[in-house]
Amino acid sequence: MTEPASSLLDRHARGWALASTALALLPLLLQLPSVLAATIAGVALLTAVVSRRGLLPVTVRLLLVLAMLALIYVQMGVRPGRDTGCALLAAMLAIKSSELHTLRDARSLLGFALFAPFAAFLLDQGPMTTLLATLAGVCALLALQRLAQVEGRSPTPALRVQVRGVLRLLLIGLPLAMATFWLFPRLSQPLWGLPDRAVSRPGLSDSMEPGQWLDLMADDTPALRAQFHGPVPAPEQRYWRGPVMTHFDGRTWIRDRRNEGRAPVPVQAGTQRWNYTIDYEPTDRRQLVALDLPNSAPTGARLTADYSLVSDRPLASLSRWTLQSAPPQVFAASLSPWQRQLSLQLPEGFNPRTAALARQWRAEAGNDDAALVRRSLDWIRAEFAYSLDAELPGRNAVDEFLFDQKVGFCEHFSSAFVVLMRNAGVPARVVTGFAGGVRNPIGDYWVVRRMDAHAWAEVWLPGRGWVRVDPTAAVAPERIYDTLEDRLGTEAGGMQGAWLQTGQAMDWLRRGWNEMVLSFDATRQQQLLRPLGMPDLSPAQLISSLVVIALMALGAMAWVLARGERERDPLLRAWHRLGRRYARQGLAREPSEPAMEWARRVDAHRSDPALLALSQRFVHARYAGTHVDHASLLADLRRHRPSSGATS
């Protein structure tokens, strides 16, 4: 059946629908893997261009669907996740424009497109995603407005008039939306769980193998932001402890998960204390970090036997943790037999040259374990170099690094050092986390980037317990060749001046967004009125406050909308108000009745010469173009009452 001409899209309406769909897709595509996002964007553009001449055949559309499903499978695998579902939505939305022919098709496309910004919030709730989603919503409303004009064959106002009308509607609903955000009771625990992501985010993992960290270390996005409440640790103390690796299979270091169920070992803390709060970026993992060493676990996390922090739930969104740490004086004064065995474990048949060297050093050092540590660091300082451009090792990775290559980064140094110590009979383990951090002077907080990921070692020494040793830091400065700063173009002088200040300002704004929006949980909601000296709000009080404010907001919305519908001409508005006064006495003017005829009819019913005079003046001012004192006429129209006989 042929579509009615009134239901077909014109060129402008089609353009609005496609532009709105593209804007809705944008925040979602920015959260997907780059290759997949670029392909979906290309398919969307190609489909929109090709389908301008008519609907694509069903066979072509089916092949497009199968091709997109295959691409998503290649990029993300068969594991279901939030990002997999979002990728499917984006792919289907990209193909949906092939069915764009009528007004009904355009409305369907816009309706589906609005799901894309909401899906993007499942992956990111940052200010950029929010801004793009808002722009997509405004554009969708403008497109729906244009479709209504096409359907009603009404003239199209200027774009600025349309935009002003849509923004006015959004502003009218803003108070109610803000009241709901701040006052609608939040659950301390989510009612349902969101699935994990199929493609994991960069972050610390339970294992460490050669080359694994290069992608993480090339990412200069923030991993956490720390605010210190009191003294700030010196640079040599800013080690952010993460997973501790104890098991080694010859190539890969693995964290012992059994430590999660064991009690933390005794620690004699030093006198220095650091109190701080960290905002930890989402990783979809459960590993947390803290300054070496955390005194206790915050609510929602637990401390393992090796003093790593593990969250109770995967960190799928930004989280805030209040912590206290202190450098240890004695960290595990004694080792149990199983702890010693675990800290000396090595696979059979790997790295024979390292084992032989360790035995030689042990024979020369006797029982002095600290001497073995010093000798190892002196060797690194004298002969080794730091570079990210290191070859991937073979089967005997430690032998190749220590005796052949002598070039690597923190993975190589920490792994080789621990294997050397274990071969010499010194209990040792690999610790992963972050090192360093850059202070943001605008907000007075510290930013630790993902590229600050680091691996170091701990050795157990009699009388001192576990002692941190960073073999990478022992490399002589003149043999540091290829660093992350070199690769990212942020070497000394490269991020100075305006660029550095701009980056700090942007990060400060992002932190403010995190503070105000993303960290607003049930606890902070209950404490909303504490700055005013009021007690915490109960859920019942929150609901009551929300109902009161919502009613006020709805009343304000109704009043604004009613004012928007009133007559803009003050003279005509006063005339209509006068007519309503007479209508209450049964003398209403008929819609098609001229002003003078109505006034004569009222005067015939009961004498009202003032109304006759006012009507005459109104007709002259409104229709005849006669010069009339509008201010005087307005005053008389507003003052006149049917029973008063106001002067004319």
Image (cartoon, helix red, strand yellow):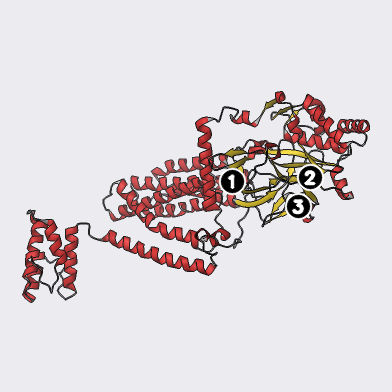
> Does 350 appear above or below 31?
above
**Could you tell me how far apart the alpha carbons at marks 3 and 1 are, in whole angstroms?**
38 Å
Is residue 646 found left or right of 272 in the rendered image? Answer: left
> Does 615 appear above or below 411?
below
Q: Position of residue 458 (x, y in %)?
A: 79, 41
Determine contact: label 2, label 3, CB under 8 Å: no
Instruction: Tell me, yes or no, if residue 59 can be seen here.
Output: no
**Mark 3 secondary-structure assignment:** loop
Instruction: Tell me, yes or no, if residue 619 can be seen here.
Output: yes
Residue carrying label 2? 329
Please tell me which residue lies in front, 247 or 505: 505
Say whether disc 2 or disc 1 marks the residue closer to the N-terminus: 1
Is residue 522 found left or right of 355 in the rendered image? Answer: left
**Could you tell me how far apart the alpha carbons at marks 2 and 3 are, in whole angstroms?**
19 Å
Instruction: Quadrant for the N terminus, please.
Output: bottom left
Give, as a three-letter code, the residue at label 2.
Answer: Gln
Give, as a three-letter code, the residue at label 3.
Answer: Thr
Is residue 97 found left or right of 638 in the rendered image? Answer: right
**Mark 1 secondary-structure assignment:** helix
Residue carrying label 3? 304
Residue at 64% in and 52% down: 322
Give, as a three-letter code, the residue at label 1.
Answer: Ile
Say whether disc 3 or disc 1 marks the residue closer to the N-terminus: 1
Residue carrying label 1? 72
Q: Residues within 10 Å of mark 2 (few under 14, many from 20)?
A: some
**Mark 2 secondary-structure assignment:** strand
Q: Position of residue 336 (x, y in %)?
A: 88, 50
Determine contact: label 2, label 1, CB under 8 Å: no
Q: Nearer the viewer, mark 2 or mark 3?
A: 2
Residue at 79% in and 28% down: 380
Say whether disc 2 or disc 3 marks the residue closer to the N-terminus: 3
